[in-house]
Structure formats: structure tokens, C-alpha cells
Amino acid sequence: MKFILITLIAAVLLTFGTFDCQAVESAANSLIKNGNFAQNMDYWSFAANVANAGGAATASVEDGVLRIDINNPGSATHAIQLIQAPIEIIYGLRYRVSFDAKASKDIAIDVKVGGVENRGWADYTNGESIGGTIAYLSKQMENHSFEFGMEERTDPNARLEFQLGSVSPSSVWLDNIKVEVIGRNTAKSVDPNLWVPNPNKIIIPEIKNRGAKLPFIQYEAENAATNGSILGPTRKFREIPNEASNKMAVNLDSTGDYVEFTLKEKTNSLVIRYCIPDSNDGKGLTYPLSLYVNGTYKRDIILTSEYAWVYGRYPWSNNPELKEPRYFFDEVSILLPEIPAGSKLKLQRDSKEKIDFCIIDLIDTEVVGTPLTMPENFLSITDFGAVPNDGKDDSDAFNACLKAAIEQKKGVWMPAGVFNFSSGERHIGNVIIKGAGMWHTVMKVEGNTFWGNGNSFEMHDFAIYGNTKFRIDTIFEDGFRGGAGRGSLIENIWFNHLKVGVWSEKNTDGLIIRNCRFRNLMADGINFCLGTKNSIVENCHFRGTGDDAIAMWSAAYNGNLLPSENNTARFNTIQCPWFANGIAVYGGRNHTVEDNVIYDTIVNGAGINISSDFSPIPFGGFITVQRNTLIRCGSYVDKYKSPTKGAICIYTPGRHDLEADLTVKDVEIYDATYDAITFEGTNRVLNAKFENIFINGAGKWGIRATGKSAGSASFTNVKIQNAVLGSVKAHPQFTIEKKEGNVGW
């Protein structure tokens, strides 16, 4: 017996090289106990409704085979789980997972060897799905196997998981489950964060007749005269220029470095988008940047990182010790004496203050008119005690003016100046609120600015500057939140440093948001939520939003049963959302997304995302996406195991098929970071058609149906060029119906 054991160990060492004795012992046996269920369900745990994700299922052993009956699959892959733990997974070794399985219908499940909460629920298999590696089950009992290498530190408390949620109601049979050591790990997995520049030259034409008609001219720093360092282009997550417009910026490395712009038109205003370092305590630094016009020094402009830089995992923190930084850029806006067209406007680093970098992304210039004057039939907040620019709280004066205006059926007027508002309850309805212009009247607000009481209102011509420095979703720090009644209007408002710009809820019908600016937010720009209907966002500009710039979410929380419906996003320009999507539609019916231009998504974000994520009321009616242009869209996904999102992403997790008539037509996609069009999710796409699509440049595939995607879509007059890996890649469960007029595939 000793001779046999020594011979066996020697053979293993010759095959795999020298590694520790425990690994050798494990190589001869599966790490899984009772993998053939001879001891009923000993060593196994089974649960449904995991993490409150819903789901109902039962498990029993019949003739040495485990049977799981899934009655309700829940809303997430982890909703129903079969687990064995702990098992030790050792760094540097390679493992094989194998099992026999079948199902009562063709389904796909996730299988994962991973860590628990203190390891971030890591998936050591590096699978492409949210829940691990995908296994496709048929009605016949078949053997399934896959290999993985342990690339993280040894985990003595790892576990094997079969994740059975978010599939069709069905029965699954499992037997002969094994996890075995098969040697050293010599093949490294591909990091989904890896981005490789498209080797093809992608020419992006001038965009006409789409996007917002904006009063300002934008100048990119990398196209200006400079003696600084040009950064990028890059799309690597957490590299600073990846969050810049055009994925490029200029670093003023040291004293005397400058970037100089030649003005195409006259201006009396300036917006600078910039990045400077955070302080060691996360509270931010300030730095003076010098402004010159035609070589003559004019003034210093104070930059701050107080509102930028967050750390760690969602929902993030201001603590640099958590590492994983993001949200690098902020903006400063100033009024100036008029500067003629053709002038040289220079930003220069003159200060001797030590700072590691001063990065300039872009500037905006425009001619700002004189302050508006109070219209007739309005009451001024200054008549109720508000004093502009004194730094004192004007809440009581505003509330008194608001109350009197409603009683007298008049409007509320806020003249030019900065007015300060402490956190409080400002409920608006049956009133018009006006300011002297978004450059002239500024509300500096702590907490939520306005709550809707379900009655209609109007807001015009002022700015709302919040004090939001990190995200807490149970705290409201928005420009507007609540029911907007019937026919409300939000026009010419500048939203900055808030959590959300506008979040509309129940009792919102026919809200119009137009000619607004949404900048440097911690979450959504606009969310048409909780039954919002017949509402429009148009001719608005979004830059630096921390969640979807525009969302239409048919959320089902707070007992809501009404879909968001008949909403439209049109003629908007969206740049650099530092998290999530340009435009996202989550459930609901009869939505239209048209004539928008979306640039430079960064992480967890498509240009346009049609999704059943976040448990919405199911899709119905029609969803029309037409005449949109997407430039450098799609991104790496750090929140889930799915590695990338396409420039257009059709994502169908949860419980329901996408049954709406989805039409995507007359869309242009340029230089997509990964795939141009992506389908992903466990539920079927049933009525999707793509017509007249032009794809020029994709870092991976032109069209890709990933992982467990199911259903079909038709494609007519779709032209694909300069896709690095190829035009189309689709898993067998998804049907690409190729019709007439397609080119390049």
C-alpha cells in the first residue's frame, strides 16, 4: 500500500511539477462530498428567494439523482441556489468542474466556484455570466465540464454554486458533481477590463440635425495649442482620460504649462472641465489656474476637487482608503468681459503650489445675455426677506413668497444673485417660479430642492447648485422629485452637483423638460419613473452624470402598478456619463428615443440600453429607437460578471420576455468600445427589428448575442465595417434573422 501511494504521488509530481501535499491529495479526489447524492442531500444547502430576489423551488433526491422543481424563478440568477461549502481553492492551481444534468425544457444555468461576502462574492471561474460559467441544459442527461485557474489568493472558504434563478419554470436534474485539481494554472483568463484600440481609422463625420441645439461652443483641449502633455486616447476603466470628452485631455504638468484656445466666436463666459487631485482625507483641494487673453493676464480661476473623486464599490464613498477611484472631472463656470472672436484664450499653470497634475478636458464659451427682469404678476423673494449673495439661509423668505404667490395666484421671482437654502421641505404645485437666467440666478441648496405635490408647476431660467459629494440612495438631494401633475414645464434650468436632476413619479402626466443643462451629478440626470406618462425631455445637454443621463423606469416599488408610458427623449446631447448609460428604458410601454447624440460612455453603460433590469413593470406596446448617433459608446462592466455592454444593449434579465415591438432604425454607431449591438439576458427578445443601421468601428463584434441571450431579431439594411473580431457572433439560443440590404456580413 505504501508503494502504491508513493508511486501515485511520484506520477502526480512528474505530471504537474511540485506543489503542496494537500493539492496532491485533492488531485486524486473530488473536493465535493456526496456529489452523487448517495447520502441524500448531506453536505448540500438549497435555498430560494435568496437576498429577497424572489423565487420558489423544491429539491429532492430520487434514485440517487437530485431533482429541483422551479415553480417561480425569481428576478435574479442567485434567487435559487444549490451550494456546497466550504471547499478550499488554492492560488496557482487549475481545476475542472464536471456534472451530469438535464432539464424539462432547454434552459441555461450558471455554475460558479467563488468566494463569500468577504471576498466580494468573487467568481473564480471567470465566467461570462453574472452568476458564473454558463451551462446549457437539454432534455437529455449530459455531462458538462469546464476548467478554470485560481488567479486570486487561496480561499479556504470558497463554495460551489448552482444558480438556478431567472430561468423559465422547469425541473432540473443533477448528478455526479465534481470539482477536481488537474494541475498548475498556466493559462491566464482574459481581463474583461482589457481594451485594445481599434487598429482601423474611424472617421466620425459632422453630426447634423441630431442632438440639442446648444448656445455654447465646445473646444477640446487636445486640439488646442499646448506645451503640456496630451493624455489618451484610452478606454481603460479608472484611467483619468477615459472619463474625458473624446477620451483625451491635456495635463499641465508643471509651472508655465498652458493650453491656448482660439475663439471661433466672441464670448463673455467660460466653462472649464478639469481634473485636479483629491486631498488625502477625501475633502478635496483647491488650485488657482491663470487666465490670459491675447497674452495678457486677466485673473485666477479657482479649481476645486471637493465635488469629484469617489472611491470603493457602489454607492461609493469619499474615503480614499477604499481605493478604486472614479468621477475625476468637475466644472467651473465664470462670467467675463466680452472677448472678441479670434482672440487667444489661455489657461496657464502659474501657481507655485504643489499639485501632482492639472488636467484640462475642454472649455465651453457662449454669449450670455443680461439678467432678465421680473415679469408682471410675480412676487419677488427679496420682498420677503431674501438677500442675494449674503451667504445666509433664504429658505423662510422663499417659502413665505411661495405661499403668498399661490394664495394670490401669482408667480415667484428670484432676481440675479446667489441664494442659499438649507435642507427643508419645499413643495411646489399650482405656481410658476422664474429667475433672471441660468447664468444669473443661482439656488445653492442643501438636500432636496423641490418636491412635487402632484399639481402642475413651471420652473424657468435659474441654476440649482447642490452640495452632493457622495451617493446615499435613501437621502434625496435632487433638483426636483415627486409628482409633477398635468402639463408641468421645466425650462432653462442648470442642474449641478446634485444627486439627481429631475425624478418624476406618480401623478406626472405631460411633463416637459427642455433647454436644460445637467452637469456633474451623482446619479441620474432625468428619470421618468413610477408611472410617469406622456412626458418629454428635449434639447437638453447632459455631461458627467453618475447614472443614466435619461432613464424611463417603470419601477414597481411603493406599490406602483402603473407603467411609465408614452414618454419621449428627443434632440438631446449626452456626454461622458461617468457611470451607467446615456439613455435607458426599463420596462413600460410606448416609449420613443429619437434624434439624440450620445458620446463617451465610461463604465456599466451603453449608449442606449433597453433593459428589464431592476424589476420593472414588463415591456408592452412599442419601443422606438430612431435617428440616434452613438460615438465611442459601450463600456466595461464592473458591477457584474458580464464583461462589456454594447453601444446599443438589449438586456433581458428578470422574469419577463421582451414582448414589446422594438424597432431600432436609422441609427449610426461610430467607434464602439466593444460591441456595437449586444443582446444579453435569460429572457427572450420576441419582436425586435433593426433597420438602416450604420456601424463604423467596433472594438469586438458588430452584433453579438452573448451568454444566455434568447429569442431573435431581424436585420435589414445593416452595414458593418471595421469591427475588430468580426461582424456577428451569436449563441445558438438567439436567432439573427438576416434580411435584405445588409452589407459587410
Image: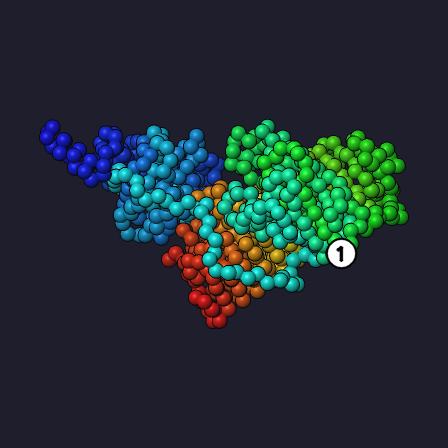
Viewport quadrant of the N terminus: top left
Q: Position of residue 23 (x, y in %)?
A: 25, 32
**Residue drawn at (53%, 29%) of the image:** 321
What residue sits right under mark 1 in the picture? 341
Identify the residue at horizontal 46%, vertical 51% (top origin).
196
In the picture, the quarter occupied by the C terminus is bottom left
Q: Position of residue 332 (x, y in %)?
A: 70, 42
Residue 501 in view here: no
Of 324 and 487, which appears nearest the observer?
324
Residue pushed farthest bottom? 740
Tell me: 386 left or right of 313.
Answer: right
Query: Would you say 39 lies left or right of 712 here?
Result: left
Q: What element does badge 1 sit on?
A: loop
> Does residue 283 sit above or below 505 in this rendering?
above
Toward the viewer: 130 or 436?
436
Residue 373, image x and y in percent?
Answer: 86, 47
The amino acid type found where label 1 is placed reads Ala
